[in-house]
Image (cartoon, rainbow, N blue to C red):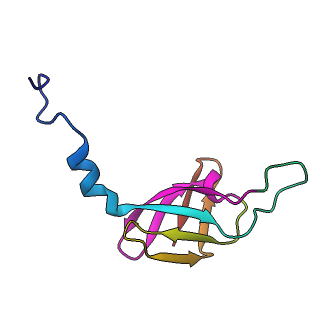
Amino acid sequence: APLPGRDWQSASPVVKKVLPGVVCIEGKGRAKRTAGEDTDPGFGSGVLIDPSGVILTNNHVVAELDAVDVTLHDGRKFTTSDIRRDPKTDLALVK
């Protein structure tokens, strides 16, 4: 039986609807970090928030990277260096 006050029992319909807006973000090259720190490129996800290609992600995903590869749900891949960061809130915009 459904839970009281709930019209759904699965997140599946919601996931199917929003998944096209979720992107994969990979650092291009290596992050500029001091010796002894992890130097692997950033890797994480983001969400398209504007049809012009603006993506909201976390600053720690793109911190200290000059460029990133963005892969859309349909497999298309884009490279960009248009990255705006706010370390204080751990948010970043990628276009």
**Location of residue 70 with respect to 2 vertically, above or below:** below
Image position of 68 (left or right of 47): right
The image shows residue 76 at horizontal and vertical percentages of 44, 76
Indicate whether residue 47 is drawn in magenta.
Answer: yes
Image position of 67 (left or right of 24): right
Indicate whether residue 56 is drawn in magenta.
Answer: yes
Could you tell me which quadrant the N terminus lies in?
top left
Residue extending farthest front:
75
At 45% across and 62% down in the image, what residue appears? 23
Image position of 17 (left or right of 28): left
Q: Nearer the viewer, residue 15 or 86?
A: 15
The image shows residue 18 at horizontal and vertical percentages of 30, 56
At 68% across and 57% down in the image, what residue appears? 63
Q: How many marks?
A: 0
Residue extending farthest right:
35
**Location of residue 80 with respect to 2 vertically, above or below:** below
At 64% across and 47% down in the image, what residue appears? 88
The image shows residue 2 at horizontal and vertical percentages of 11, 26
At 33% across and 57% down in the image, what residue appears? 19
Q: Which residues are magenta?
A: 40-63
Query: In the figure, residue 4 lies in which quadrant?
Result: top left
Query: In the figure, residue 9 lies in which quadrant?
Result: top left
The image shows residue 66 at horizontal and vertical percentages of 70, 71
